[in-house]
Amino acid sequence: MESQDPAVVEAVKASGESTLEKATAKAKETFDQLMNVSLNIAVTGKTGSGKSSFINALRGLNEDDDKAAPSGVTETTMEPTMYEHPAVPNVKIWDLPGIGSPNFKANKYLKDVKFHTYDFFIILNSERFMENDVMLAKEIKKQNKNFYFVRSKIDNDILAEQRKKGFDEQNILCKIRKDCQKNLKELGDPKVFLISSFELEKYDFEIFQNTLEEELPDHKRSALQQAWPVCSAESLEKKIKMFKGMIWAASLASAGVAIVPVPGLSAACDTSMVLLFFTRCYYAFGLDDGSLKRLSEKVNKPLLEHLAKSKFASAIREKAMARLQVSVTLATLATLEYVASLFPGVGSAAAAGISFGTTYYLLREGLNELADIARKIRKEAELDILCSNS
């Protein structure tokens, strides 16, 4: 290969490569934050209020699944128990000790459970909220953190009332809500969210989700949207939109590695980023085996077969994203990146451009395919018809 004038090389580097490196470094920082920002959710309430079932529902697990929070266990400890989200490990849900003791002291309780660990608090009760709930909320507010009242086990209330003559579901829900708020008057007029851990698509779960999204800082919101269960067509579309917004940063971050003249390095980075991105989409859209199995049983329809039609879903299930990446196009591009990177400055920009284009195309095509599958599954399961009738 013909040698190049070092002065020309340095001039090209100074004008182009430093700007490119800064842009890709910033993109990588953005992508890493979107994927790894921590979110710590505290769930508290008296023993028997359904904390374990609620925590399992947020994590997309049944009570008999591996790593599920055990239910029906008598609390004997004052230590918080942390449950990591199975697909989004930076999201952690903490089961705090019960607050039903007659000698309850809110400020001591918050100190004991390490108050500053958590981004917000969910105060759960399966009946009316009591004095201890109010005391805890006041102390949380005093220390400038958000709290949310969740009235759990609404499905049990509805089931009990259905047997009565003149049953009206909306009237029952309104009565429960007013009864809860009556005991919380000294806190102003706090919202009370009526939720069933076994029927998230019903009642106030989506309103609760929207409220959290509105009140969380921007960088924390993406963690919530990735981890929170899909409860409606609208919540699915929000997730799809969020992931579409990540594609540019992920692609540009990938381009940064192509600047380094090492064969296969960018290809490897592309594979890692692409697999992480798609794995998050896969779980966020409810396409993992556990979620689809539970949904299939609920609606009595075979839904797992939809995944077999998607090359992206199959690659994610087998953790074989490299098979997609090296499937002709990317194998060729990995070589082109190396050749281009031998020419400093201009060559690096070319290599980065190839890597960016490749990653962008893959992420866009894969996201669209997974989104379409999720929409088809909801349609076949008739979930949105069920929601509109609830």
Image (cartoon, rainbow, N blue to C red):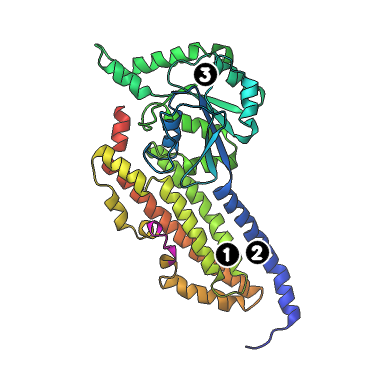
Between disc 2 and disc 3, whose residue precedes?
2
Q: Disc 1 marks which residue? A: 255
Name the residue carrying label 3. 100
Comparing labels 1 and 2, the label whose residue is closer to the camera:
1
The residue positioned 71% from the left and 77% from the top of the image is 9
- Taking 131 as reference, is 146 above or below it? below
Using the image as rendered, state which of residue 366 and residue 288 is in the foreground. Answer: 288
Query: In the visual, does 181 lie left or right of 144?
Result: left
Quadrant where the C terminus lies? top left
Residue 289 seen anywhere in this rendered image of the structure: yes
Range covered by the magenta-colored residues = 316-322
Pointer 1 with pointer 2, Cβ within 8 A: yes
Mark with earlier residue (1, 2): 2
Residue 323 at x, y percent in the picture: 41, 67
Q: How far apart are marks 1 and 2 (CA)?
A: 9 Å
Q: Between residues 4 and 267, which one lies in front from this camera angle? A: 267
Assign a secondary structure to mark 3. Answer: loop
Helix, strand or loop at label 1? It is helix
Instruction: Identify the residue at image location x=52%, y=24%.
Output: 98
x and y, in percent, of residue 374 in the image: 35, 47
Q: Which residue position holds label 2?
A: 20
Please tell me whether residue 112 is drawn above or below residue 187 in the rendered image: below
